[in-house]
Image: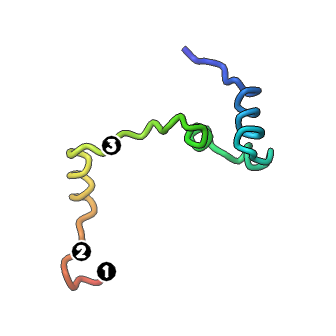
Amino acid sequence: MSRALDWAGLMQAGLQGLRLTPDQFWRLTPAELALMLGQGSQARPLGRAVLDALMQAYPDAAKGDMR
């Protein structure tokens, strides 16, 4: 179920609470605004399986290997 955004509340928090200019406020992504308002991010810690897959896809260069 989708919730409507409280634009008036978000604008008040951004413009008055964070003292952003209107231009700064409207250039923010919702994630950036949430982080600035102390609501944290949706990011999760990287799990071992994902780390292993990244290490395999992007291995470190061998010592002395100048890519």
Give the residue pinned by disc 1: 67
Point out residue 56 in the picture as x, y percentages from the top left corner: 21, 58
Q: CA distance from mark 1 to mark 3?
A: 30 Å
> What amino acid is at disc 1?
Arg
Label 1 residue SS = loop
Tell me whether circle 2 and circle 1 mark residues in contact (CB < 8 Å). Answer: yes
Disc 1 crowd rating (10 Å Cα; few below 14, some 14-19, many 20+) is few
Q: CA distance from mark 2 to mark 1?
A: 8 Å
Point out residue 45 in the picture as x, y percentages from the top left corner: 32, 43
- Name the quadrant containing residue 11: top right
> What amino acid is at disc 3?
Pro
Mark 1 or mark 3, whichever is nearer to me: 3
> What amino acid is at disc 2?
Ala
- The disc placed on residue 46 is none
- The disc placed on residue 45 is 3
Badge 2 or badge 1: first in the primary sequence: 2
Badge 1 or badge 3: first in the primary sequence: 3
Give the residue pinned by disc 2: 61
Point out residue 55 in the picture as x, y percentages from the top left corner: 23, 58
Q: Hey, which residue is sitting farthest front in the picture?
A: 17
